[in-house]
Structure formats: C-alpha cells, structure tokens
Amino acid sequence: MAKKSGSSKNKKGSNNRKDRMSRKKSEEEFKKAETEKKVIKGAIAFFIIVVIIALAVRIASPPPGGETDYSSPYEIIGNELVIPISDVSTSASFYSYDSNGKDVKFFVVRGSDGDIHTAFDACDVCFKEKKGYYQDGNKMVCRNCGQRFTTNEIGTANTGTGCWPGNIIRTVDNSYVRIKLSELDRGRAIYFP
C-alpha cells in the first residue's frame, strides 16, 4: 500500500481550513442577513405604528375651529324663521332647522360693513363632505378645502367657480333677520340631501 505524500496531506489540511473559513463566512453572512431582516421588519413595524397613531390623532382631534354649536335660538313665525337682530354680532351664530327630518345648518354674522350676512353651513362644492365652516377673525373658513371668505362676502351668489358659502336669501327689518322656510327647504334639497 502506498503512503500518501505529504503534499496531499497539506492539500487536505488546506481544504479543511478553506471549508471551515467558508462555513464561518457563510454563517457570518447568514447572521448579517438575519440582522438586516430584523432591522427592516422593525422599521416597517415602527412606520406602521406611527401611521396608525397619526390617523388616530387626526380622527380624535376636533376639526379646525373646534366643534360647531348649532344651538343658537330662533323662532318660527308664520312661514318664516326669525332671529332677533340683537342676537347678531361679528361672531357667527350657527343654527339648525329641521326641514322634513333633515337638519339644515346655516350661520348668521354681522360683517365689518355693518350688514347682516347669512349662508348655509355648506359650500357649493364641498357640501358632500358635510364639514361646513368655522370663523377665524373676520373670515369664514371651509373646513374641507380651507378657502377663506371675509364675512362681508357672505350672503351673495357664488361670484366665481369653486368653493363658496351657499347663499341664503333673507330680509332684515328693524327687529329681525327673516328667512322663508321655503328658502331653508331649498337649501335642504341642494346642500343637505
């Protein structure tokens, strides 16, 4: 039987060392890949948590301008809704009228021009979102698109295209702001279907 030469022993030893180094390198690469996967999974989980928290805060947050209080008082006299002029100020008052089971929401405000301005709490474009307006100084702001209107602009037909507070036709005498119930019913059909 022939003896193995020393060079074949060296080759075998060299191959074993290469195999061990290769296995060690493979194990390190595997561990590195596993660590990267964990980091990526952690980053994705963190991102999802941040998005969920942001959505929860947005849902739980009151709308810009706070919640609207529609409890301002009015009277029905004949076929009109009437609001005492003494109740009208530069701070918008919000009202809700039951028109055949639907709440028709509107506001009344005295402009810097001294006139009394009325509009549905809905806009010609954004009414489907049912968000209405809030007051910021002498401006009424659409809660949906952010358009701003001076109180002096309120109470006119849309002067262009796009967002505009739904106009309410009203009359004003020495004692009352008067809005025909048929006008509120018209608004129900358009803005509060």
Image (spheres, rainbow, N blue to C red):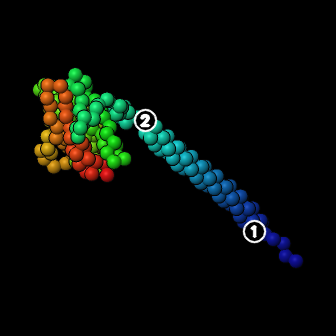
Task: Identify the residue shown where x is 43% and y is 39%.
Answer: 58
The dot on residue 132 is none
Q: Is residue 61 left or right of residue 184?
A: right
The amino acid type of the residue labelled 2 equals Ser
Res. 93 image quadrant: top left
Res. 1 image quadrant: bottom right
Q: Secondary structure at mark 1?
A: helix
Is 72 located above or below residue 52 in the figure?
above
Of the numbered discs 1 and 2, the one sitting upstream in the chain is 1
- Residue 139 in percent (x, y) is at 21, 31
Crowding at mark 1 (Cα within 10 Å: few <14, some 14-19, many 20+): few
Which residue in the structure is indicated by mark 1?
A: 8
Q: Nearer the viewer, residue 21 or 193?
A: 193
Q: Nearer the viewer, residue 71 or 31?
A: 71
- Residue 141 in percent (x, y) is at 25, 36
- Residue 120 in percent (x, y) is at 25, 41
Determine if residue 54 is in view.
no
Residue ranking furthest to the right: 1
Q: Secondary structure at mark 2?
A: loop
Pointers 1 and 2 in contact (CB under 8 A)?
Answer: no
Which residue in the structure is indicated by mark 2?
A: 61
Task: Identify the residue shown where x is 32% and y is 29%.
Answer: 72
- Residue 145 in percent (x, y) is at 27, 43
Is 83 located above or below residue 191 in the figure?
above
Mark closer to the observer (1, 2): 2
Disc tally is: 2
Task: Identify the residue shown where x is 18% and y is 25%.
Answer: 175
The amino acid type of the residue labelled 1 equals Ser
Res. 64 image quadrant: top left
Q: Nearer the viewer, residue 82 or 69?
A: 82
Crowding at mark 2 (Cα within 10 Å: few <14, some 14-19, many 20+): few
Residue ranking furthest to the top: 86
